[in-house]
Image (tube, rainbow, N blue to C red):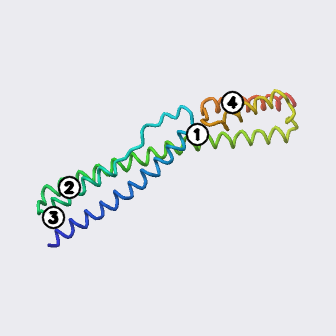
Amino acid sequence: MAMQTERFDRLDGLAAAVDRLGADETRTAREFAVARAKIAAHGLPAPSRAAPVLRARLRQVAALARRGQWPRAAADLAAVEEALSVARRRADGLYEIAAGLLHRRDELRDRLEAYRRKAAAAGLAGDGGLAEDHERARRLLYTAPCDLRASARAVHAYRLALAARLEARR
């Protein structure tokens, strides 16, 4: 009887882990939606939705256990645990990819602002060419969907133009 209780506890624990995976997959899907709307050429795959499948498999395992088919239930339970582990890694990885794209855009925006402040502090805010470079980068970074590659090149070009002007003053 203790063995059966332990097995049902394992099922309950796994069901809770699948519920957490489902919540994380929903969070990832939301992050994907934001990244797809805000980042051009994002290259994001379809977000994973393994939790519903795993829930159905757990129901099958529970049915086997209720019928006393413990060897088969134990084998299926181990397979669900492995599938859950794979799904967890995939969900975490996909979330990090989508969040990373948005983080990269924000990082470029912060850099551009820092360079703009540096230019203003050096009295270069009125430099027409430099202002055009800044505006080009700003427009790319604040247009949705944002082209991260073009934005990175534009921020880099602005930084180089600023550095050249600062060097010319020395």
Considering only order in the chain, which callout, 3 or 4, is on the residue closer to the N terminus?
A: 3
Classify residue 15 as left or right of residue 100.
Answer: left
Q: From mark 2 to mark 1, how far is it between C-alphas?
A: 41 Å
| Label annotation for residue 38 | 1
Image x and y of residue 49, in percent:
37, 47
Task: Tell me the residue that label 4 is attached to.
Answer: 154
Q: From mark 4 to mark 3, how far is it between C-alphas?
A: 63 Å
Q: Which of 87/120 is in front?
A: 87
Number of residues whose C-alpha sits closer than 10 Å to that of mark 4, classed few (under 14), some (14–19) or many (20 or more) = many
Residue drawn at (47%, 37%) of the image: 44
Considering only order in the chain, which callout, 1 or 3, is on the residue closer to the N terminus?
A: 1
Q: From mark 3 to mark 2, how far is it between C-alphas?
A: 10 Å
Instruction: Check disc 3 and report its element: helix, strand or loop.
Output: helix
Between marks 4 and 3 in the image, the one whose residue lies nearer the viewer: 3
Q: Which of 80/33 is in front?
A: 33
Instruction: Check disc 2 and report its element: helix, strand or loop.
Output: helix
Task: Tell me the residue that label 3 is attached to.
Answer: 66
Considering only order in the chain, which callout, 1 or 2, is on the residue closer to the N terminus?
A: 1
Task: Tell me the residue that label 2 is attached to.
Answer: 60
Amino acid type, residue under disc 4 in the picture: Ala
Q: From mark 4 to mark 2, how far is it between C-alphas?
A: 55 Å
Tag 4–tag 3 contact (CB < 8 Å): no
Between marks 4 and 2 in the image, the one whose residue lies nearer the viewer: 2
Number of residues whose C-alpha sits closer than 10 Å to that of mark 3, classed few (under 14), some (14–19) or many (20 or more) = few
Tag 2–tag 1 contact (CB < 8 Å): no
Q: Quadrant of residue 15?
A: bottom left
Classify residue 62 as left or right of residue 13.
Answer: left
